[in-house]
Amino acid sequence: MVVVIIIAVMSVAVVSSLNGNSDRAARLQANRFMAVVNEVRDEAVIAGDNFFLLVDDNAGTYRFESTRSQQEAVADTLLKSRSVDKKVTLDWEVYEVFDNDGETQERVLITSLGEITPFEARFKGTELSYDVIVNQEGQLERVDKKAVGF
């Protein structure tokens, strides 16, 4: 009987630990995302170039694309595709949609003036959700929430 109780306590501890790692990974991914978007925003202002932020929430990836035809001026590491940790779910919503030859595309424009299209990126762990939004001042902000709908 004591052995069964010890195993049950250890199982609860392991499950709790795994949930914490998922939530911690979601927070780290949200912070990383904000840092990269801000770095691209700085590059847009410095280089006088516009960039698109393209997110594939099904694959859990995001990348940046210069609006100029020649992208060699920007370091490849800045424009590379980035993946979100497998323990984290990425949801994406853009509040302005671009029309490209009759095809609508959800992508965020980062202008050479430092402006950014309003969007919301949600990085979900097991129990917590970290939303990255563009606030009223046009700055990125992380909003922490209790995850709902799991």
Image: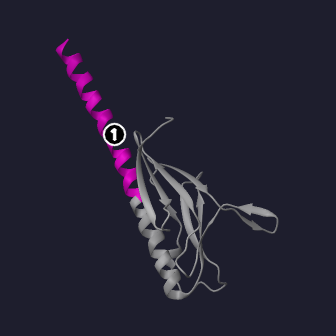
The image position of residue 55, as x and y in percent, is 58, 60
* 66 relative position to 125: left or right: right
Extreme residue toward the right, this view: 102
Residue holding disc 1: 18
- Residue 128 visible from this viewpoint: yes
The image position of residue 6, as x and y in percent, is 20, 22
Main secondary-structure element of the magenta-colored stretch: helix
- Would you place residue 140 above or below residue 46 in this image? above
Point 48% across, 67% down: residue: 137
In which image quadrant can residue 59 be found?
bottom right
- Residue 75 visible from this viewpoint: no
The image position of residue 77, as x and y in percent, is 47, 76
How many numbered markers are drawn?
1
* 109 relative position to 38: left or right: right
- Would you place residue 15 above or below residue 34 in this image? above
Crowding at mark 1 (Cα within 10 Å: few <14, some 14-19, many 20+): some
Point 54% across, 54% down: residue: 60
The image position of residue 123, as x and y in percent, is 47, 51
Name the image quarter holding the N terminus: top left
Residue 28 belongs to magenta span:
yes
Q: Which residues are magenta?
A: 1-30
Q: Amino acid at mark 1?
A: Leu
Element carrying mark 1: helix
Extreme residue toward the front, this view: 136
Point 45% across, 69% down: residue: 36
Residue 106 belongs to magenta span:
no
